[in-house]
Amino acid sequence: MTEDKAETIALMALAWIIADDELLPVFQGATGAMADDFRARASEAEFQVSTLDFLMMQDSWVIAFCDAKGLSYDSLMEARQSLPGGAEMHWT
């Protein structure tokens, strides 16, 4: 996956979270991010990776997002790994 496509998926995920009245407060509580942060940091790879990490915490969120956007269920992990700093850490 290209970095541009990964960024697009991360921004789609952020917009989807913001539009969900039940999920938004959970995201804000988990990240400490507020509306101003969404605008100011949306283009930062670190924020995009953390957005994808949050969404991947629950299979039901992944399924709902991917179904709504017509994406494969593994696209979130692929996007995360394609963003700068998003590769999984291997400690061995």
Image (cartoon, rainbow, N blue to C red):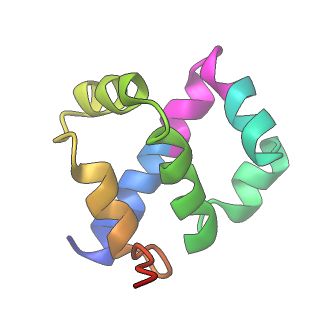
- Could you say which is closer to the camera, residue 65 or residue 38? 65
Q: Position of residue 55 (x, y in %)?
A: 49, 40
Q: Residue 68 or 85: which is nearer the viewer?
A: 85
Q: Tell me residue 15's x, y (percent).
A: 53, 38
Quarter of the picture holding the C terminus: bottom left
Residue 76 in the image: above or below residue 15: below
Total tally of numbered discs in the picture: 0
Q: Is residue 48 left or right of residue 31?
A: left
Q: Quadrant of the N terminus?
A: bottom left
Q: Position of residue 30 (x, y in %)?
A: 74, 40
Residue 69 in the image: above or below residue 1: above
Vertical side of 62 occupied by 40: above or below: below
Residue 44 in view here: no
Q: Quadrant of residue 39?
A: bottom right
Residue drawn at point x = 65 percent, y = 15 percent: 21
With 18 as the anchor, is 31 left or right in this view?
Answer: right
Q: Is the stretch drawn in magenta largely helix, strand or loop?
A: helix
Q: Nearer the viewer, residue 9 or 54?
A: 54
Residue at (74% x, 25% y) in the render: 25
* Residue plotted at (54% across, 61% down): 48
At 35% from the left edge and 70% from the top edge, which residue is drawn?
Answer: 81
Left or right, residue 31 beside residue 51: right
Residue found farthest to the front: 92
Q: Is residue 19 a member of the stretch shown in magenta?
A: yes
Q: Is residue 28 magenta?
A: no
Q: Find the magenta span and give its range.
A: 14-24
Q: Looking at the image, which residue sits at the far top?
A: 22
Is residue 20 visible in this depiction of the protein? Answer: yes
Position of residue 76 measured from the top left corner of the image (x, y, whole percent): 33, 51
Q: Which of the pair 48/74 is nearer the observer? A: 74
